Amino acid sequence: MTVKASWPTNTWYVAYSSDEVTDKPQGRQICGQRMVFYRTQNEKIVALADFCPHRGAPLSLGYVNDEGDLVCGYHGMVMNCDGNCKSMPGQRVNAFPGITAYPVEERYGFIWVWPGEAEKADTDLIPKFDFFDDPGWAYGGGVYHINCNYKLMVDNLMDLTHETYVHASSIGQPEIEDEAPDSFKDGDTVVTKRTMEAIKAPPFWQNALKFNDLEPTADVDRWQISRFTPPSHIMINVGVAVAGQGGFDAPADQKASSVVVDFITPESETSIWYYWGMARNFKPSDEELTKTIREGQGQIFSEDLEMLEAQQRNLIDNPDRQLLKLNIDGGGVLARRMIDKILKQEVSAS
């Protein structure tokens, strides 16, 4: 019996950042499907199944010719951008069955791919993130390959209680545990919100206050607002403001805040591509500050990587163990329910 995968397919995932895709073919597995990505000479992004119909060689080991077609590196089979067999030295191949061509879209500095039914792909379904195109914001980020199921990362980002322990030296602090989060659905998103008042900022946010010309040791009001959008995108509004100035709604000159960007793309049932970053609207033209924040955030997320991979190994070794669900897990539970609903809809429509 074939087991249904745990991820939706009729949806958009981040496959690469824009600067990673060139005219050199690159292979990547997404949602259990091996794909090859490349740019043509006119900058068009192409995504095909990474499988030559001749002998099954990976097309990612080939090259792009002057016409923008993909040439297999094994025997020279030429595939066009639609996945059709175009030519092969000394052979007639036009009648050969082609391969899957995946819908792709370049937006916000990322390459998005639709791994499901191509005829259902709609670029209007890509979530809208206005800050990527706003010159008043700066963004810096990176990517990690993590050996865990994508839902474990969703759980991680929808419950930030773990910061007290996993990130004790940077963004964690005991006060996080003193305030229970509020989790709820908001249309087709899930929100988990936590606020803390009149506390000292942890090291990462003390530096952010200093960067924004504020006193780093001042009492602050802190907020964490995680927003999950299917299938696996999470934006987290985070920040601190001088205590008593309105918290999240404080004037810009009284706070340091940003949006943590999380695009989670399943590779397999036990591995993901995780594109992380931070968008901020203070000192957006300061490139050195962007680099400093990116390096600090990269270290923070590397701590998550170690924990998540160890968690996944434990779950593989103990498949029948039932896990506890506590009040802090509310956001992750609601997100998983939303994913399950989408999966059921895909099954009923197939």
Image: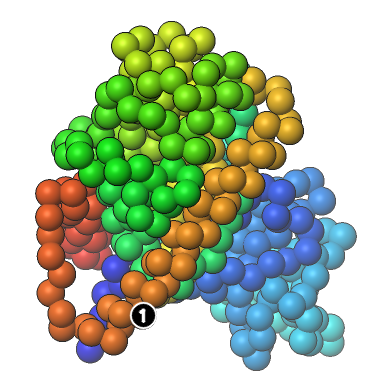
Residue at the location (62% across, 87% down)? 56
One can see residue 349 in this view: no
Residue indicated by mark 1? 313
Q: Residue furthest front?
A: 217
Q: In which quarter of the image is the N terminus?
A: bottom left
Residue 297's spot in the image, x, y percent?
Answer: 55, 46
The amino acid type found where label 1 is placed reads Arg
Q: Quadrant of the C terminus?
A: bottom left
Residue 21's spot in the image, x, y percent?
Answer: 70, 55
Residue at the location (12% across, 74% down)? 322
Residue 325 against residue 313 in the figure, above or below? above
Where disc 1 sits, the SS reads helix
Q: Within 10 angstroms of label 1, few (less than 14), some, or many (20 or more) residues? A: few
Applied colour scheme: rainbow
Q: Is 314 on the left or on the right of 274, as rendered?
A: left
Q: In which quarter of the image is residue 325?
A: bottom left
Residue at the location (66% across, 86% down)? 57
Q: Is 150 on the left or on the right of 195, as rendered?
A: right
Q: Which residue lies furthest to the right in this view?
A: 66
